[in-house]
Amino acid sequence: MAAGAAEDLHQFRVTMRRLRALWWTYRPLLDRRQYARHRALFKGLGDIAGQVRNYDVLSSLLACVAHDAPLPENIARERALALAHAKTTMARREVMRDLANTSAQAVQSLRPLPKCAQSEDAFVSLRIAVARKNMKREAKSAGHAPGRSRLEQLHELRKRGKTVRYLLELFEHGNAADKRHLKQLGRLQESLGKLNDVVASEALLRSRPGLLGGRMDAAKLRKRLRSLRKRHLRAAMALIRA
């Protein structure tokens, strides 16, 4: 039951990301305050759902880098609490009401397409071009950023890349160039995802040092995670430079 609920939450989180990408596409046509409110709603719900996955990722990484030690019970307990919190939040009437009202409010807020746009397709194509430009800018910044700031830039690049990918999928831009771009994005996103998992797990352990419960050598574990992070960082940068 817990595994199924966690998978449902993961799919919900992906849906929230897709909605954020869709909202970003039509941002120039939406009321600014309603746009900000809805985007914050999508992000907040996605973050709550993501807490469960954070513990799953940490457990998976610990099983790989500390295979000689049993997983601490604290992690399973905290994961169960995060899952219960997420399920309770999603079941709240006001949350479901806000999600249900989002589309109706968006339709009311939409203004006619700008006169310079020949069609909605032209408008969407322009927004996808902007998303690609934003992604390229983050890639360039990451290539020159030092130390910890590089990790932050790569995290931003991952988010920009997801926006591009979701828009290409949502609006079915299926020409050959877009298909090649989706393949390239897929490889980069997979690499950045592995890096992000390690960075997020390190951050979780720093913020919750009691998670290990004294059953693991914390210093040894941090060293192994640091080595894994550096490996994934080199792989991601190689893909960006290529």
Image (cartoon, helix red, strand yellow):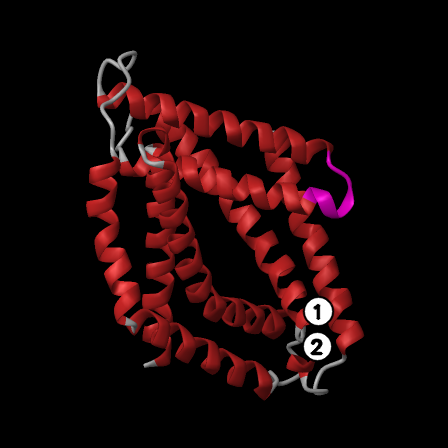
Task: Left or right? Give the position of 139 relative to 97.
Answer: right
| Predominant SS along the magenta part | helix
Considering the numbered disc 1 on the image, is that residue within a helix, a strand or a loop?
A: helix
Task: Left or right? Give the position of 172 relative to 205.
Answer: left
Identify the residue at image location x=52%, y=40%: 188
Instruction: Report the disc number at residue 123.
Output: none
* Type of the residue with mark 1: Arg
Q: CA distance from mark 1 to mark 2?
A: 6 Å
Name the spot of residue 22 as percent of width and height, x first: 33, 40
In which quadrant of the rendered view does residue 183 lie?
A: top left
Identify the residue at image location x=32%, y=53%: 15
Q: What is the quadrant of the N terminus in the image?
A: bottom left
Considering the numbered disc 2 on the image, is that residue within a helix, a strand or a loop?
A: helix
149 in magenta: yes
What is the tally of numbered marks visible in this picture?
2
Name the spot of residue 239 as percent of width and height, x first: 59, 36
Q: Is residue 127 above or below residue 213?
A: above
Magenta range: 145-150
Identify the residue at image location x=23%, y=45%: 105
Name the spot of residue 102 as percent of width and height, x first: 26, 50
Instruction: Report the disc number at residue 206.
Output: 1
* Type of the residue with mark 2: Pro
Kindly indicate whether the residue at mark 2 contacts the one at mark 1 (C-beta within 8 angstroms): yes
Work out which residue is located at the far right of the displayed protein and give it: 219
List the residue tagged with mark 2.
209
In which quadrant of the rendered view does residue 175 lie?
A: top left
How crowded is the residue under tag 1: few (<14 C-alpha within 10 Å), some, or many (20+)? Answer: few
Q: What is the quadrant of the C terminus in the image?
A: top right
In which quadrant of the rendered view does residue 69 lie?
A: bottom right
* Front-most of residues 27 and 219: 27
